[in-house]
Amino acid sequence: MVYAPLGADMSVEIDNITAEKPHIFKTGSAYAQAFSLFDAAIALGTIFGPVWAGMMYHLTNWAWMAVSLAVICASGAIPV
């Protein structure tokens, strides 16, 4: 549910950036760079979440683990 709208938005922004400054990227490389960085961020979250949750559960208890993950999720919801 997240990939399709974000993919469309990223494509539009890539087109806008390359139209304003065509010399920044080689032909087609802007799409590859943007989508690979997006996929890397998703993969990092998939790795970081369980590691963080396990560490917090081990050091504290499940309530503090849930609170810490809620704070991380809430910080990701803040628009930039």
Image (cartoon, rainbow, N blue to C red):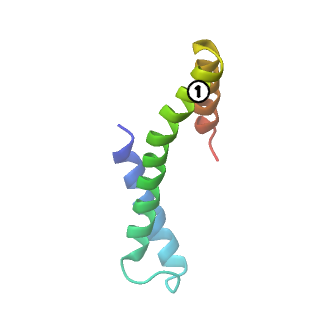
**What residue is shown at x 48% (from left), y 32% (from top)?**
50
Q: Position of residue 65 (x, y in %)?
A: 60, 21
Horizontal side of 35 relative to 80 (left or right) equals left
Along the line of sight, the residue nearer the viewer: 33 or 51: 51
Residue type of the residue flagged with mark 1: Leu
Alpha-carbon neighbours of circle 1 within 10 Å: few (<14), some, or many (≥20)? some
Vertical placement of residue 63 versus 50, above or below: above
Along the line of sight, the residue nearer the viewer: 72 or 9: 72
Vertical placement of residue 60 versus 24, above or below: above
Vertical placement of residue 35 versus 20, above or below: above
The number of callouts visible is 1
**What residue is shown at x 61% (from left), y 14% (from top)?**
61
Quarter holding the N terminus is top left
Along the line of sight, the residue nearer the viewer: 12 or 73: 73
Task: Answer whether residue 26 is visible to the viewer in this image.
Answer: yes
Vertical placement of residue 43 versus 20, above or below: above
**What residue is shown at x 42% (from left), y 84% (from top)?**
26
> Residue beneath label 1, please?
69
Secondary element under disc 1, as helix, strand or loop, is helix
Horizontal side of 72 relative to 49 (left or right) equals right
Q: Position of residue 4 (x, y in %)?
A: 34, 47
Residue closest to the far front: 58
Task: Answer whether residue 9 is visible to the viewer in this image.
Answer: no
**What residue is shown at x 36% (from left), y 45% (from top)?**
3
